[in-house]
Amino acid sequence: MKPTLPQIPDRSARPGFFVSFEGGEGVGKSTQIQILKNKLIELGKSVVTTREPGGTKAAEAIRAILLGNEYHQLTDRAEALLFAAARADVVANVIDPALADGNVVLADRYLDSSVAYQGYARKLGSEEVKVLSLWATRGLLPDLTIVLDLDPIIGMNRVSSPDRLESLELNFHRLVRNAFRELAQNEPNRFLLVDASLDTNEISNIVFDEVQSRLAL
Ligand code: TYD
């Protein structure tokens, strides 16, 4: 059965600006989010950061199941539903209200992680997983998605104590990387693909230039 996209409400008039950061393991998302946050605050912007899965009491409880090494029997579909459930909760309780209040929201992972990890790498189907997430979030898409692109051999080397997903074989992480690259290529207006092997400052300048031009700062 071919899934149909849910009706997406028009949030184009929302005063806030929504940036998601995506990529495989160990690509440096949290460092870049922190740097961008500081630069935006210096310019007088109010910034809200989130990380997925997590960000609300319920989403943190779901995170413990999703990443816990004791849940090896979790099925791929249950995993996809739990990521979507956690996302539904953080969007309704944190992200949507922050955007309505005019904040810049910087999200450490969002819907494209589900499309890449569950849709492509778990092979559940990228369209199906995207539709599930759009249903969960009532159609909320980022204004800008930064993909930090890195060879998973380098990224996985930076992971010290692997969680349930980080413990998956290298080939899984290769599929994730290719998925993000494909997503970025297919939607060039929303995505910016950045070479995460560059040095931290260079990456942060590329990211800031893009945000600045989109926000007309
Ligand atoms: P986390 O420890 O936050 O990893 P990272 O620092 O790399 O972001 O764990 C998040 C893990 O969950 C990571 O392996 C990616 C995975 N994930 C999915 O598989 N699907 C999703 O929708 C999201 C948000 C994360």
Image (cartoon, rainbow, N blue to C red):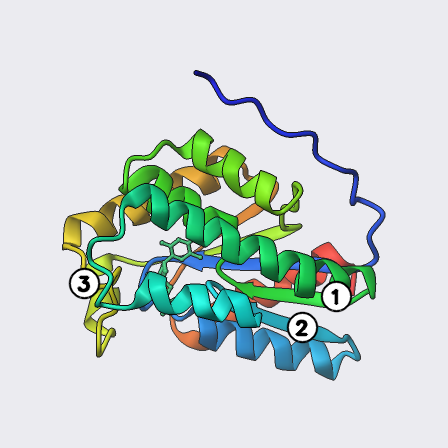
Q: Nearer the viewer, residue 81 or 112?
A: 81
Residue, x 60% and y 58% (percent of image)?
Answer: 89
**Where 86 sits versus 122, above or below?**
below
Amino acid bearing label 1: Ala
Residue beneath label 3, please?
A: 167
Mark 3 Cβ inside 8 Å of ligand 1: no
On the picture, is 148 further left or further right than 48? left
Residue beneath label 1, please?
A: 98
Q: Is residue 139 visible?
A: yes
Counting from the top left corner in percent of width and height, residue 72 is at 20, 58
Circle number at residue 48:
2
Local packing at callout 3 (Cα closer than 10 Å; few below 14, some 14-19, many 20+) is: some
Counting from the top left corner in percent of width and height, residue 50 is at 57, 69
Circle number at residue 107:
none
Q: Secondary structure at mark 2?
A: strand
Q: Secondary structure at mark 1?
A: helix
Earlier-in-chain disc, 1 versus 2: 2
Q: Is residue 197 visible?
A: no
Residue, x 45% and y 39% (percent of image)?
Answer: 183
**Where 142 sits versus 158, above or below?**
above
Q: Secondary structure at mark 3?
A: loop
Q: Residue furthest top?
A: 1
Amino acid bearing label 3: Ser
Counting from the top left corner in percent of width and height, residue 177 is at 31, 49
**Where 202 sits versus 9, above or below?**
below
Q: Do tag 1 and tag 2 residues touch (Cβ < 8 Å)? A: yes
Q: How many marks?
A: 3
Q: Do tag 2 and tag 3 residues touch (Cβ < 8 Å)? A: no
Earlier-in-chain disc, 2 versus 3: 2
User: Within the image, what quadrant is residue 22 found in?
Assistant: bottom left
Q: Nearer the viewer, residue 81 or 176?
A: 81
Local packing at callout 1 (Cα closer than 10 Å; few below 14, some 14-19, many 20+) is: many
